Image (cartoon, rainbow, N blue to C red):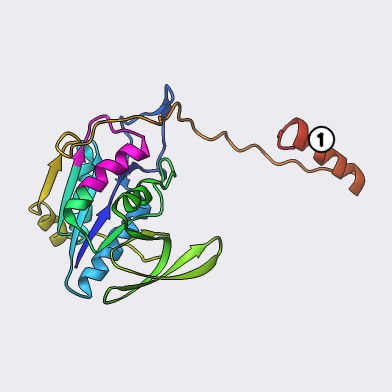
Amino acid sequence: MKIVVLLKQTFDTEEKVVVEGGKVKEDGAQFIINPYDEYAVEEAIRIKESGDAEVVLISYGPARAEEALRKALAMGADRAILIEDETPSADEAYVAELIARAVEKEAPDILLAGYFSVDNGAGQVALRVAERLGMNHVGAVLKLTLDGDRVRAERDAEGDIEVVETTLPVLLTAQQGLNDPRYPSLPGIMKAKKKPLDRLTPGELGVERKETTQVIEQYLPPKKEAGKIIGGTAEEAARELVRLLREEAKVV
């Protein structure tokens, strides 16, 4: 069995994020494996450990994304492919076309990815890849069971659980709760330095850059303000609440 995991390096949203000129300032920023992709990596390694499987990582991004790939290799993945671009596109259709070309060459039985990335939250690339390759798809997976070419997945359905059964090949996107990602061991880190990491360019994949969508501006959310306590009778409080929602919050 071959498992391909789509992995994205994102800035660490738990650390201080600085925005200048409508863009996230990368100098001094901490970069990590997208947390949802880390669940996908862990699930792939668990499948590998329970049987005979090869785990291949594919990422699109600048050269610094190698750090995230090496960490996933240290977790237990076998090899990695970096589609290197020092000015990565934010256009999901273009990125999906690039990744789909690389995935197609690998011909995986299972394609794993995170439910979405924490830097933009679009959750489009993996789904577009599956569509291009004609693969079945189950999203927001919380539990996975494999039996030959049969797949049984329990997925998050807006607070409830939906059970989906399908067949290989399939794309599965990992939701928080699927597993607890392991920390790379020291032997794993040492082995990761020697594991294959191939680099490709968009030109080598035969994909011409297209920008059908673009990010105009990035900004931090507004600071939370102190709450207000509305006094008076129930009728007076209701009137004041409606006024505040209309005039200050501007939501009605």
Q: Is residue 95 magenta?
A: yes
Query: Residue 223's x, y, as percent?
Result: 57, 35
Quick one: which residue is furthest to the left in this view?
Answer: 194
Q: Amino acid at mark 1?
A: Arg
Query: Residue 65's x, y, as percent?
Result: 23, 42
Closer to us: 150 or 134: 134
Closer to us: 37 or 100: 100
Mark 1, Cα crowd under 10 Å, few <14 / some 14-19 / many 20+, is some
Name the residue rendered at 39%, 65% in the picture: 178
Name the residue rendered at 31%, 58% in the picture: 112
| Total numbered labels placed on residues in the image | 1
Name the quarter where the N terminus is drawn.
Answer: bottom left
Place residue 187 in its image quadrant.
bottom left
Name the quarter where the C terminus is drawn.
Answer: top right
Name the residue rendered at 22%, 38% in the picture: 64
Question: Is 25 situated left or right of 233 in this image?
Answer: left
Query: Residue 16's x, y, as percent?
Result: 41, 37
Q: Return the residue at label 1.
A: 243
Query: Residue 40's x, y, as percent?
Result: 32, 59
Closer to us: 129 or 69: 129
Question: Is 83 situated left or right of 167 in this image?
Answer: left
**Residue 68 visible within the image:** no
Magenta part of the chain: 83-101
Quick one: which residue is furthest to the front in this view?
Answer: 134
Rendered view: 66 above or below 114: above
Rendered view: 208 above or below 65: above
**Residue 33 visible within the image:** yes
Closer to us: 148 or 23: 148
